Each structure stands twice: as structure tokens, then as C-alpha cells.
Image (cartoon, rainbow, N blue to C red):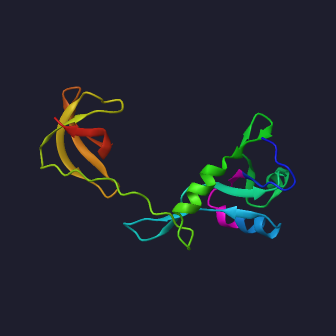
Amino acid sequence: MVATKNKTTWFLARTKPNREGYAADNVKRQGYRTLLPKYIDERTKRTHILFPSYLFVQTTGQWMFIESTYGCIGVVKRGEQAEPVPHAVIRALWKEMAKDDTVELPKAPVQTYSKDAALRVVNGSFAGCVGLYQGMDALQRVCVLLELLSRKVPMWLPAADVVAA
């Protein structure tokens, strides 16, 4: 996709780790628009970058400046050419963003199990194994006691990867 003079194009810039804000400021100083979506961690109430080490940059087709902007590593490319971000993706992000650039993430349904309830692993390396429920942590991971090599081993798995046996 090649942009014309009047048409703007969004590109995805790769930034240095934890330097997304710094890179966004430097891109803005050059007269370009940026998009840096964030989310609020419900547990800690802290704001985090939704796509760590990435920054959306709107240009009129020129993208080479991104590679020499302080805080940026480069631009996401397909081969030698920068890959534009579809406008539908940007519109969807804008639609979900609040005034403070935060996006409300959907809350995962939390399934509660009683202690020592039988659970079956449905995804991952241990798919098909059955173990006993031990608890859940704040990151929505379930501790399942699996029997491996004649030993009971606690395994922390995403809650979506287990179902009642």
C-alpha cells in the first residue's frame, strides 16, 4: 500500500523497551500524530502500555524518519517496505479509548472450583491430564496438582486451559 500526498497512513514503530512515551514525544516534535493505547491494571490500579515496545505513527507515507527517531528502533516491515496498519484497526482502537488514552480490557470470567476438585487440562503440553484444583492467583492462573513421573507436581496454568473433569 502506497500513500498519496493527501492520504495519511498509520505505521507501527518498534520502540526501545520502556521508552514508548519518550519515542512518542520525539515523533510528535517532528509534527506527526501518534497513538499509544494504555490500560489500567485492575489489581494494582497502575497504567500500562497496551502494546509494550510499539507505537502507532500517522504519516503521509514517509516512514524513514521513524528509524532515526530517538526512542525508536525501527518500523514494522514486510521485506524492505514498511507495512501499513489497516485503518480499521486504528478506528477500533480510537473507538475503545477513553480521553486518557486508556482502553478498558474485557474481564475474563472467573470460574471457581472447590479445593481438590478434579480438573482436566484442555490446552497446552498437558492437555488431557487430570489433576486436583489447589487455588488461583491474581493473574487468573489456576494451580493444578498433576501426577507426573509418580510425583504430584503443582502446575500453574491459565484459567481458560482447564475445565471441570
Q: Does the magenta stretch include residue 73?
A: no
Q: Residue at x 74, y 64 (%)?
A: 33
Residue 58, percent across and down? 74, 58
User: Residue, x 26% and y 39% (percent of image)?
Assistant: 162
Q: Position of residue 78 (x, y in %)?
A: 73, 36
The part of the image, by quadrant, that contains residue 120 is top left
Residue 121: tell me if it is visible: yes
User: On the rendered image, what quadrant is the N terminus found in?
Assistant: top right
Q: Is residue 158 visible?
A: no
For residue 112, side relative to residue 14 (left or right): left
Return the x and y of residue 142 as percentages of the image width and height.
27, 47
Lateral position of residue 165 relative to residue 26, left or right: left
Q: Position of residue 38 (x, y in %)?
A: 54, 64
> What is the span of residues highlighted in magenta in the rendered image?
11-22
The image quadrant of residue 125 is top left
| Quarter of the rendering occupied by the C terminus | top left
* Residue under the image location 71 percent in, 64 percent down: 24
Figure check: 149 above or below 117 = above
